[in-house]
């Protein structure tokens, strides 16, 4: 055997070992759960007029936290069912990949809540909501897309493309709003619609796609 | 060049398909047959033949069970298989090192 062939063999072994260590638990239930919570939260926020930056940001931070806890419990249940450790190496890799972007989104939300809390109650009006409510959902959408894209390197299929849908969708809207002028955007209502579309409907669509393909693969 | 490492390469593992199976199993406690078939893009027959060869060499253990009322075949490396794989990788590294040392 030639030395360069041996090096090639080692590279193939490494690639295969990495590929077999990808996350293999079903993603469909997690995506569907996130979709249901996202859609319900958007409908609630829209109907209950959570429109000031403080309430909007605080509300969606709570929804994010609730979704993360629910997903954690669901994945833990899957692990218990399969008699596996919860924190398998692929799960750990996915958590590491998700964390930076999600942490930035969380800190951004906390900063906005902190700034709003410092204002006197009379100043926390819808009139001041423009900048926060126009930019914040878009930034959250793009950051979440980046998180999914990074995690997608450790999952079998589709997650990276799903991440791209968030990144491109967020960026396209940002460009569109910049072209028509941010002043003409009605962020008070659009914020919840945007969050519902991306974090609710998109997750539901992906969850449905995964449950169909996962069932096909199991058959 | 010292030819010894070449001669010591395990012929059972050295075949492309079996090396791929051993590599995947080395990174996972166990893998389902269907999962390996999909990841390696192999046919059922091809994968079965390779696994049988590895099983006869004592490198791979097969377990049959049921999941959601469906038969589930899982494969894992035996301790002998793990050692043979580690030895194989060490030999490849030695071959690569020989040229680096020149």
Image (cartoon, rainbow, N blue to C red):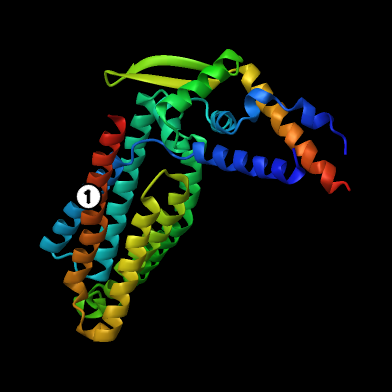
Residue B32 located left or right of residue A19? left
User: Where residue A110 sits in the image (x, y, percent)?
Assistant: 38, 62
Q: Mark 1 highlights which residue?
A: A204
Does residue A54 lie above or below A76 as drawn?
A: below
* Residue drawn 47% across the image and 50% down it: A153
SS of the residue under disc 1:
helix
Residue A144, by quadrant, is bottom left
Which image quadrant is residue A156 in? Answer: top left
In the rendered image, the quadrant that contains the C terminus of chain A is top left
Position of A34 compared to B27: left or right? Answer: left
The residue at the point 36 percent across, 50 percent down is A158
| Coordinates of residue A97 in the picture (x, y in percent) | 48, 51
Q: What is the number of callouts on the image?
A: 1
Q: Quadrant of the N terminus of chain A?
A: top right
Q: Is residue A19 visible?
A: yes
The residue lying toward the viewer, choosing from A11 and A79, is A11
Q: Can residue B31 be seen? A: no
Residue B36: x and y in percent read 45, 31
Q: Percent from the top left, x then y, of residue B92? A: 73, 36
Q: Residues within 10 Å of mark 1 (few under 14, many from 20)?
A: many
Chain ID, mark 1: A
From this view, report whether residue A59 is shown above or below residue A184: above
Who's the residue at 68% across and 22% down the image? B83
Residue appearing at x 53%, y 30% in the figure: B28
Q: Is residue B101 above or below residue B74?
A: below
């Amino acid at each position: 055997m030639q030395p360069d062939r041996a090096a090639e063999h080692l590279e193939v072994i490494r690639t295969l070992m990495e590929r077999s260590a990808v996350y293999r638990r079903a993603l469909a239930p997690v995506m569907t759960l996130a979709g249901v919570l996202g859609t319900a939260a958007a409908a609630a926020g829209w109907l209950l007029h959570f429109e000031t930056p403080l309430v909007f940001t605080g509300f969606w931070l709570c929804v994010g936290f609730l979704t993360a806890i629910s997903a954690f419990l669901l994945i833990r249940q899957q692990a218990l069912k399969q008699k596996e450790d919860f924190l398998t190496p692929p799960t750990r890799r996915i958590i590491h990949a998700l964390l930076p972007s999600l942490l930035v989104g969380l800190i951004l939300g906390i900063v906005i809540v902190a700034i709003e809390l410092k204002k006197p109650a009379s100043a926390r009006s819808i009139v001041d909501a423009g900048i926060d409510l126009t930019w914040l959902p878009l930034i959250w959408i793009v950051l979440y897309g980046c998180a999914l894209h990074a995690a997608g390197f450790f999952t079998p299929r589709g997650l990276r493309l799903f991440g791209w849908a968030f990144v491109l969708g967020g960026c396209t809207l940002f460009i569109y709003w910049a072209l028509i002028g941010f002043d003409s955007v009605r962020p008070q209502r659009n914020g919840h619609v945007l969050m519902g579309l991306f974090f609710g409907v998109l997750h539901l669509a992906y969850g449905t796609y995964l449950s169909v393909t996962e069932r096909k693969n199991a058959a | 060049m010292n030819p010894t490492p070449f001669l010591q390469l395990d012929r059972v593992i050295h075949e492309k398909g079996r090396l791929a199976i051993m590599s995947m199993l080395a990174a996972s406690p166990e893998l389902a047959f269907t999962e390996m078939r999909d990841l390696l893009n192999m046919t059922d027959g091809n994968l079965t033949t390779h696994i049988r060869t590895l099983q006869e060499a004592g490198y791979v253990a097969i377990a049959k069970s049921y999941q959601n009322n469906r038969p589930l075949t899982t494969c894992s490396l035996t301790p002998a298989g793990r050692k043979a794989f580690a030895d194989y990788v060490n030999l490849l590294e030695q071959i690569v090192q020989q040229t680096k040392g020149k």
